[in-house]
Amino acid sequence: MTAQSAPPPSAEEQLRLPLERHGEAEAFVVSDSNADAAGVLARWPDGVGSVLSLYGPPGSGKSRLAAEWAERVGAMPLHGAEAALIDPLELEGRPVLLDRAPDADDESLFHLINLANAGGGALLLVSRDAPRSWTVALPDLRSRLDALRTVAVEAPDDVVLSVILRARFAERSIAPADEVIDYLVRRLDRSAESAATVVERLDALHRPVTRVLARQVLDEMQKPESVDDAD
């Protein structure tokens, strides 16, 4: 008997890549910086519109919110330029999550919006900036983006930044005192990237993480980069 070869993977199987995560054990914390967006996604699709734009700065938690929404509604996740690699008919009548939405080409984005508006589906667009600021060439796409319903996630506030710091420390089996966390929260830039950087630098010193050590590391991070004098 001739062994049958396995069927080729579907387009969805080829494209279904893992979304950005902050760790499976890390609970998403709702605070003033993300409460509006969390509330909208908890209820959406809600009959108000089939396309929704979720935007915010890097490290604000928007991809985490979007991933939880996709799991809840069974949405197909796509990332940017991947939108051009899938047959729109495969998406008909189902929710779709398009992360890094501005990276999609105009035609693919236009078709995804039209498909969602045709009924039965939903399209969540995730980006750093609001759709009105995206650079597009198609006039019809421009008008659709300008009319989209949007919801913003702000930069992490003290509550969220504190949770991020504790999670990054926990990943390295470090449990600093509350006063260290409070000190870092008051002085760090409002971003998950800054939190990850300071934790990495503190860990690299292989010393107990104290407020004094935290101050030393922050002082080093805030020094301007030296520039060699030109002759």
Image (cartoon, rainbow, N blue to C red):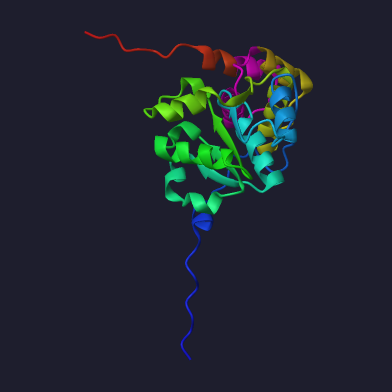
Residue 92 in the figure: left or right of residue 71: left
Q: Residue at x 75, y 34 (%)?
A: 43
Residue 9 visible (yes or no): yes
What stretch of residues is rendered in magenta? 187-216
Front in this rendered view, residue 177 or 56: 56
Front in this rendered view, residue 73 or 62: 73
Residue 16 visible (yes or no): no
Q: Is residue 158 placed above or below 55 in the rendered structure?
A: above
Which percent across, then down, holds residue 19?
Answer: 58, 43
Q: Residue at x 49, y 70 (%)?
A: 7
Q: Main secondary structure of the magenta part?
A: helix
Quadrant of the rendered structure where residue 182 is?
Answer: top right
Verify whether residue 49 appears in magenta.
Answer: no
Which percent across, then down, holds residue 36?
Answer: 72, 23
* Outermost residue toward the right in this view: 178
Q: Is residue 175 placed above or below 211 in the rendered structure?
A: below
Front in this rendered view, residue 24 or 47: 47
Q: Residue at x 46, y 52 (%)?
A: 87
Q: Residue at x 47, y 25 (%)?
A: 143
Quadrant showing the C terminus: top left
**Number of marks in the rendered image:** 0
Front in this rendered view, residue 103 or 180: 103
Which percent across, then down, holds residue 117?
Answer: 57, 38
Q: Is residue 143 placed above or below 229 in the rendered structure?
A: below
